[in-house]
Image (cartoon, rainbow, N blue to C red):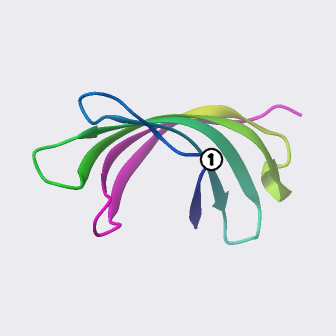
């Protein structure tokens, strides 16, 4: 399961792009988890409420099997701020930095 937290109000640019600081918590079946601190850019599309999502996520720590987690993820996809639907893919590395 992945939970997303918005950390403060997003900044809106002249072209409607949203820039936000977010955090994600990834929780696995065994209860282990890791958390990220992110810089997100949401670029508007031609469909009202639909944005292209590009995020750089830095892993800040974890619990259980991920207690010494570090690394970074790139998150790309779309988010519909009207329906709440998110489609995303993650690439990157989760390392043991203990």
The picture quadrant where one finds residue 28 is bottom right
| Rendered residue at 39%/47% (across/down) | 89
The picture places residue 13, in percent across and down from the top left corner, at: 34, 29
21 vs 90, nearest the viewer:
21
The residues colored magenta run 74-98
Quadrant where the N terminus sits is: bottom right
Please tell me whether residue 92 belongs to the stretch shown in magenta: yes
The dominant secondary structure in magenta is strand
**Measured along the vertical axis of the image, is residue 79 above or below residue 94?**
below
Q: In the rendered view, does 53 fall on the left or right side of 32? A: left
Q: How many marks?
A: 1
**Measured along the vertical axis of the image, is residue 50 above or below residue 69?**
below
Q: Residue furthest top?
A: 14
Q: In the rendered view, does 56 fall on the left or right side of 16? A: right
Quadrant where the C terminus sits is: top right
Please tell me whether residue 50 belongs to the stretch shown in magenta: no
21 vs 67, nearest the viewer:
21
Q: Which residue lies furthest to the right in this view?
A: 98
Crowding at label 1, few (<14), some or many (≥20) Cα neighbours within 10 Å? few
Q: Residue furthest left?
A: 46
| Rendered residue at 57%/62% (across/down) | 2
- The residue at which mark 1 appears reads as 7
Q: Element at badge 1?
A: loop
The picture places residue 84, in percent across and down from the top left corner, at: 35, 67
| Rendered residue at 70%/48% (across/down) | 35
| Rendered residue at 80%/54% (across/down) | 65
The picture quadrant where one finds residue 19 is top left
The picture places residue 50, in percent across and down from the top left corner, at: 23, 53
């Amino acid at each position: 399961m992945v939970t997303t937290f918005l950390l403060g109000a997003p900044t809106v640019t002249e072209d409607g792009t949203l820039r936000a600081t977010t955090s994600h918590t990834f929780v696995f079946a065994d209860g282990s988890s890791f958390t990220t601190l992110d810089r997100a850019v949401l670029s508007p599309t031609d469909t009202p409420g639909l944005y292209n999502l590009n995020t750089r996520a830095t892993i800040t720590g974890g619990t259980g099997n991920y207690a010494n987690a570090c690394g970074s993820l790139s998150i790309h996809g779309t988010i519909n701020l009207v329906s709440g639907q998110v489609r995303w893919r993650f690439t990157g590395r989760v390392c043991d930095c203990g």
